[in-house]
Amino acid sequence: MKTNIPADFSFSQSNLHTYLRCRYKFYLRYIQGLLWPAQLTSDALVYEEDRNAGIRFHQLLHQYFIGFDQDLLVQMAQNDPDPRVLEWFSSFLLSPFAQLDGELNPEKTLNANIDGKLFTIKMDLLQFVDGLYHIYDWKTSRKIPSRKTLLESVQTKLYPLVLSEALSSNFPIHFHILELNQVDAPITFTFSAPEVAKSRDYFMLLTDEILALEEHEFFRTDKLQICKTCEYRSHCNRGIKAPGISDLELLDMEDYLETGNLNTDLV
Ligand code: SF4
């Protein structure tokens, strides 16, 4: 039986990332809308603390870029229950990212209709300067991903594509990633028009595949490691016990920032 993905379904970095890890999870979460209560990690408190600290830090940077008084923000960071928020904010203020020129749009959402399919991205910061766009992403990962992992991620490929389609932007498009636990080594990717065209082909093929699947083709992943950190593991009979936090690859802040749902992971 063919699945009925709603016509207004919008592809995003988090739902495409989910699909690539497990088609069945994509089906459960985004087509069936099935919420399945499960503890994501046995270190649930640590995970919650990490996620909430990351969210509060992102909010501080949002307020910084819309012009809140810097001393007030430092005070807020000092009063934060998690000392890492002050460390991250202090590191950020000392970095060149705190002194950006041009037109700055924090927490910028863009939508694009590409070949009849909808796509949504939400950037931590979009800068327009000297006729070019720069995308910025702040990360507070415990485990710092490699440059290769970041380059191959859905986010890094999708954001420049949607930006170029939504704003008919000039090229190159720059994508800057700042790991707050490693501020002295920011990563920048630069995308030319042919590189973004390649991403376009990739996402068109991928989304065509998703839209063409029959219900039974949303099969379960055969990578059991992925199931260890999946909230649906008891539904799929792939374990009940929650993993330790060190088993988590990345704290998926973008998932929360896209959906605005604090229970995105701990459903
Ligand atoms: S438990 Fe495994 S198979 Fe089931 S939805 Fe999660 S990742 Fe997919």
Image: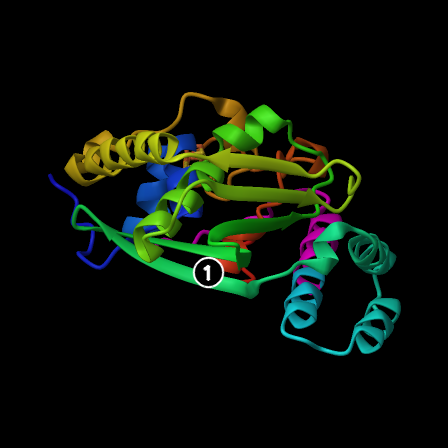
**Residue 34 covered by magenta stretch:** yes
Q: Please give left or right for residue 121 compared with residue 67 in the image.
A: left
Q: Nearer the viewer, residue 98 or 22?
A: 98
- Looking at the picture, how far across and down is residue 264, in whole percent? 51, 55
Q: Nearer the viewer, residue 26 or 159?
A: 159
Furthest-front residue in view?
A: 130
- Looking at the picture, how far across and down is residue 211, in whole percent? 19, 40
**Residue drawn at (39%, 51%) of the image:** 163
Q: Please give left or right for residue 101 compared with residue 90 in the image.
A: left
Q: Is residue 145 above or below residue 30?
A: above
**Residue 235 covered by magenta stretch:** no
Q: Please give left or right for residue 31 compared with residue 6 in the image.
A: right
**Residue drawn at (12%, 41%) of the image:** 2
Label 1: few (<14), some (14–19) or many (≥20) C-alpha neighbours in 10 Å:
few
- Residue range corresponding to the magenta coloring: 33-56
Would residue 53 be visible to someone looking at this image? no
Instruction: Name the image quarter holding residue 150.
Output: top right
- Report which residue position mark 1 lands on: 259
Instruction: Name the image quarter holding residue 73.
Output: bottom right
Taking the image as four quarters, which one is ligand 1 found in? top left
Would residue 43 be visible to someone looking at this image? yes
